Amino acid sequence: MILAIIMAAILIAVCTAIHYGVLKFSSQFVTPSRHPGHCLGVAVASIVLAHILEALLYATGFWVAVHNFQVGDLVSSSSNGSASLTFMDYFYFSLVNYTTLGRGDLMPNGHLRFMTAMEAFHGFLLITMSGTFVLQIMNGKKPLAN
Protein backbone atom coordinates (compact mmCIF):
# COMPACT_ATOMS: atom_id res chain seq x y z
CA MET A 1 0.00 0.00 0.00
CA ILE A 2 2.85 2.38 0.79
CA LEU A 3 4.24 1.92 -2.72
CA ALA A 4 0.83 2.70 -4.26
CA ILE A 5 0.60 5.88 -2.15
CA ILE A 6 4.10 6.97 -3.14
CA MET A 7 3.48 6.28 -6.83
CA ALA A 8 0.15 8.15 -6.73
CA ALA A 9 1.79 11.11 -4.98
CA ILE A 10 4.54 11.25 -7.61
CA LEU A 11 2.01 11.07 -10.45
CA ILE A 12 -0.07 13.83 -8.85
CA ALA A 13 2.96 16.08 -8.38
CA VAL A 14 4.30 15.54 -11.91
CA CYS A 15 0.92 15.94 -13.62
CA THR A 16 0.10 19.06 -11.59
CA ALA A 17 3.44 20.60 -12.56
CA ILE A 18 2.87 19.74 -16.22
CA HIS A 19 -0.65 21.13 -16.16
CA TYR A 20 0.39 24.38 -14.52
CA GLY A 21 3.30 24.70 -16.93
CA VAL A 22 1.06 24.20 -19.96
CA LEU A 23 -1.52 26.70 -18.70
CA LYS A 24 1.19 29.23 -17.82
CA PHE A 25 2.91 28.75 -21.20
CA SER A 26 -0.30 29.03 -23.21
CA SER A 27 -1.37 32.12 -21.25
CA GLN A 28 1.60 33.92 -22.84
CA PHE A 29 -0.13 33.60 -26.22
CA VAL A 30 -3.54 34.68 -25.00
CA THR A 31 -4.71 38.26 -25.49
CA PRO A 32 -8.51 37.94 -25.54
CA SER A 33 -9.13 41.62 -26.27
CA ARG A 34 -7.21 41.37 -29.55
CA HIS A 35 -7.80 37.84 -30.84
CA PRO A 36 -10.61 36.07 -28.95
CA GLY A 37 -11.01 33.17 -31.40
CA HIS A 38 -7.28 32.55 -31.64
CA CYS A 39 -6.98 32.62 -27.85
CA LEU A 40 -9.70 30.05 -27.39
CA GLY A 41 -8.12 27.77 -30.01
CA VAL A 42 -4.68 27.99 -28.39
CA ALA A 43 -6.15 27.35 -24.95
CA VAL A 44 -8.26 24.36 -25.97
CA ALA A 45 -5.50 22.76 -28.06
CA SER A 46 -2.91 23.10 -25.30
CA ILE A 47 -5.33 21.87 -22.64
CA VAL A 48 -6.34 18.80 -24.66
CA LEU A 49 -2.68 17.91 -25.26
CA ALA A 50 -1.91 18.38 -21.56
CA HIS A 51 -4.77 16.10 -20.51
CA ILE A 52 -3.74 13.40 -22.99
CA LEU A 53 -0.14 13.57 -21.75
CA GLU A 54 -1.28 13.37 -18.13
CA ALA A 55 -3.50 10.36 -18.80
CA LEU A 56 -0.55 8.77 -20.62
CA LEU A 57 1.64 9.31 -17.57
CA TYR A 58 -0.98 7.72 -15.32
CA ALA A 59 -1.24 4.78 -17.74
CA THR A 60 2.52 4.37 -17.59
CA GLY A 61 2.36 4.50 -13.80
CA PHE A 62 -0.34 1.83 -13.75
CA TRP A 63 1.63 -0.34 -16.16
CA VAL A 64 4.78 -0.05 -14.03
CA ALA A 65 2.82 -0.64 -10.81
CA VAL A 66 1.29 -3.84 -12.19
CA HIS A 67 4.20 -5.28 -14.17
CA ASN A 68 7.20 -4.17 -12.10
CA PHE A 69 5.91 -3.83 -8.54
CA GLN A 70 2.87 -6.17 -8.47
CA VAL A 71 0.79 -3.47 -6.75
CA GLY A 72 -2.40 -4.96 -8.16
CA ASP A 73 -3.85 -5.90 -11.49
CA LEU A 74 -6.05 -4.51 -14.22
CA VAL A 75 -8.59 -7.08 -15.33
CA SER A 76 -10.83 -7.08 -18.37
CA SER A 77 -14.40 -8.11 -17.70
CA SER A 78 -14.31 -10.06 -20.98
CA SER A 79 -11.17 -12.14 -20.27
CA ASN A 80 -9.30 -13.84 -17.46
CA GLY A 81 -6.41 -11.85 -15.97
CA SER A 82 -4.23 -9.11 -17.42
CA ALA A 83 -2.14 -11.34 -19.69
CA SER A 84 -3.98 -10.16 -22.79
CA LEU A 85 -4.02 -6.45 -21.88
CA THR A 86 -1.75 -4.18 -23.89
CA PHE A 87 -0.37 -0.78 -22.97
CA MET A 88 -3.14 0.73 -25.11
CA ASP A 89 -5.67 -0.94 -22.80
CA TYR A 90 -3.98 0.76 -19.85
CA PHE A 91 -4.05 4.08 -21.72
CA TYR A 92 -7.73 3.64 -22.56
CA PHE A 93 -8.48 2.77 -18.93
CA SER A 94 -6.52 5.81 -17.77
CA LEU A 95 -8.42 8.15 -20.10
CA VAL A 96 -11.77 6.74 -18.97
CA ASN A 97 -10.73 6.97 -15.33
CA TYR A 98 -9.10 10.43 -15.64
CA THR A 99 -12.31 11.89 -17.03
CA THR A 100 -14.31 10.08 -14.31
CA LEU A 101 -16.39 8.39 -17.00
CA GLY A 102 -15.93 4.99 -15.36
CA ARG A 103 -17.10 2.59 -18.06
CA GLY A 104 -16.35 -0.56 -16.07
CA ASP A 105 -15.03 -2.82 -18.82
CA LEU A 106 -11.59 -2.81 -17.18
CA MET A 107 -11.35 -3.13 -13.41
CA PRO A 108 -8.41 -2.59 -11.07
CA ASN A 109 -7.83 -4.79 -8.07
CA GLY A 110 -5.39 -4.79 -5.18
CA HIS A 111 -3.70 -1.53 -4.27
CA LEU A 112 -4.00 -0.38 -7.89
CA ARG A 113 -7.54 0.62 -6.88
CA PHE A 114 -6.08 3.37 -4.67
CA MET A 115 -3.95 4.69 -7.52
CA THR A 116 -6.90 4.71 -9.91
CA ALA A 117 -9.11 6.48 -7.36
CA MET A 118 -6.46 9.16 -6.98
CA GLU A 119 -6.29 9.55 -10.77
CA ALA A 120 -10.05 10.09 -10.96
CA PHE A 121 -9.92 12.70 -8.19
CA HIS A 122 -6.89 14.41 -9.71
CA GLY A 123 -8.29 14.28 -13.24
CA PHE A 124 -11.49 15.94 -12.03
CA LEU A 125 -9.41 18.65 -10.34
CA LEU A 126 -7.28 19.28 -13.45
CA ILE A 127 -10.32 19.33 -15.74
CA THR A 128 -11.88 21.91 -13.41
CA MET A 129 -8.69 23.99 -13.57
CA SER A 130 -8.84 23.82 -17.36
CA GLY A 131 -12.47 24.89 -17.41
CA THR A 132 -11.67 27.85 -15.19
CA PHE A 133 -8.81 28.83 -17.51
CA VAL A 134 -11.06 28.71 -20.60
CA LEU A 135 -13.84 30.58 -18.81
CA GLN A 136 -11.45 33.41 -17.98
CA ILE A 137 -10.46 33.66 -21.65
CA MET A 138 -14.10 33.68 -22.73
CA ASN A 139 -14.71 36.53 -20.26
CA GLY A 140 -11.97 38.55 -21.95
CA LYS A 141 -9.40 38.11 -19.19
CA LYS A 142 -5.81 37.00 -19.50
CA PRO A 143 -5.48 34.04 -17.12
CA LEU A 144 -2.35 33.57 -15.02
CA ALA A 145 -1.18 37.07 -15.95
CA ASN A 146 1.53 38.52 -13.74
Image (cartoon, helix red, strand yellow):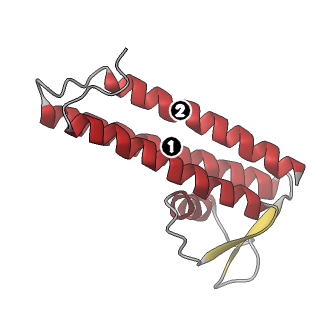
Do residues under tags 2 and 1 come within 8 Å of each other at their CB atoms?
yes
| Image location of residue 60, percent across then percent down | 66, 49
Residue placed at 70% from the left, 48% from the top?
61
| Image location of residue 45, percent across then percent down | 31, 41
| Residue type at the position of mark 2 | Ile
Q: Earlier in the sequence, mark 2 or mark 1?
A: 2
Residue 93 location, quadrant:
bottom right
Q: Residue furthest bottom?
A: 78
Camera-side residue of 24 and 92: 24
As helix, strand or loop, the secondary structure at mark 1 comes to helix
As helix, strand or loop, the secondary structure at mark 2 comes to helix
Quadrant of the rendering where the C terminus is positioned: top left
Could you say which disc has been placed on residue 89 in the image?
Answer: none
Residue placed at 14% from the left, 33% from the top?
36
| Image location of residue 8, percent across then percent down | 73, 47
Mark 2 surroundings within 10 Å by alpha-carbon count, few (fewer than 14), some (14 through 19), many (20 or more):
some
Q: Vertically, is 73 above or below 119?
A: below
Camera-side residue of 93 and 84: 93
Could you say which disc has been placed on residue 18 in the image?
Answer: 2
Could you say which disc has been placed on residue 53 in the image?
Answer: 1
Q: Vertically, is 92 above or below 2?
A: below
Closer to the camera: disc 2 or disc 1?
Answer: 2
| Residue type at the position of mark 1 | Leu
Quadrant of the rendering where the N terminus is positioned: bottom right
Q: Is residue 68 left or right of residue 125?
A: right
| Image location of residue 134, percent across then percent down | 30, 41
